[in-house]
Image (cartoon, grey):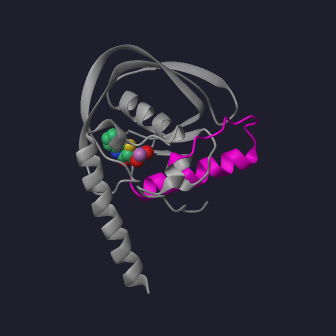
Amino acid sequence: MALLDILEFPDPKLRTKAKPVTDVNDGIRKLVDDMLETMYDAPGIGLAATQVDVHKRVVVIDISEEKDQPLVLINPEFTPIDGEQEYDEGCLSVPGYYETVTRVERIRLKATDRDGNPFEMDCNELLSICIQHEIDHLDGILFVDHISKLKRERIKAKLVKAHKAAAKARR
Ligand code: GNR
Ligand code: NI
């Protein structure tokens, strides 16, 4: 297992559209294990491969209190069922910032598990939010794309400044 580096906004690599996984093999399972370790270490409730600069459609999620219910989603897709919900979202790629995002409340998820078996499930509440947030990452979309341009540009400027200060401290 290994901890992976997480890309941060406004890194243009976060805009890459991830490619479908054609074969769930040991290389994909190694990526999944490294992503789970990275997500639990961060800590976060989800992580998309895009965030660790791997442009394959792989997501890990664990919204459980005990952090003992990992969910592995390969080639995830969702269809909206109904409703809308607002939630103060954060993102490991936008550290320190939280903004209210409106998303679909209930969705039907279709994905493949770590053994290559397809499955479907209906999701609501936080799990639904997290799945939509992670699938956005695979399409190069961040939660800040769902808020006003003014707020997004403010967050961008602050993160660029923080990245410059961090780079300077490292020299
Ligand atoms: O850890 C995370 N928390 C979170 C809170 C509200 C909505 C979405 C999320 S996902 C985020 C981890 C992350 O950045 N996943 O891509
Ligand atoms: Ni995120």
Task: Name the residue located 56 percent from the left edge and 29 percent from the top edge.
Answer: 76
- Please tell me whether residue 32 belongs to the stretch shown in magenta: yes
- Can residue 76 be seen in the rendering of this structure? yes
Q: In this image, 23 relative to 140: left or right?
A: right
Where residue 96 sits, quadrant-wise, is bottom left
Residue 75 horizontal side relative to residue 143, left or right = right
- Is 118 placed above or below 137 here? above
The correct choice, above or below, for 96 with respect to 124 in the image is: below
Which span of residues is magenta-colored? 15-43
Q: In this view of the protein, which residue sits in the foreground, 133 or 158?
A: 158
Image x and y of residue 135, in percent:
49, 34
Tell me the quadrant of ligand 1: top left
Residue at the image position 41 percent from the left and 54 percent from the top = 93
Residue 36 appears anywhere in the view: no
Q: Does residue 69 show up magenta in the picture?
A: no
Q: Nearer the viewer, residue 59 or 50?
A: 50
Which quadrant holds the N terminus?
Answer: bottom right
Where residue 62 sits: x, y (%)? 44, 41
Q: Position of residue 55 (x, y in %)?
A: 62, 46
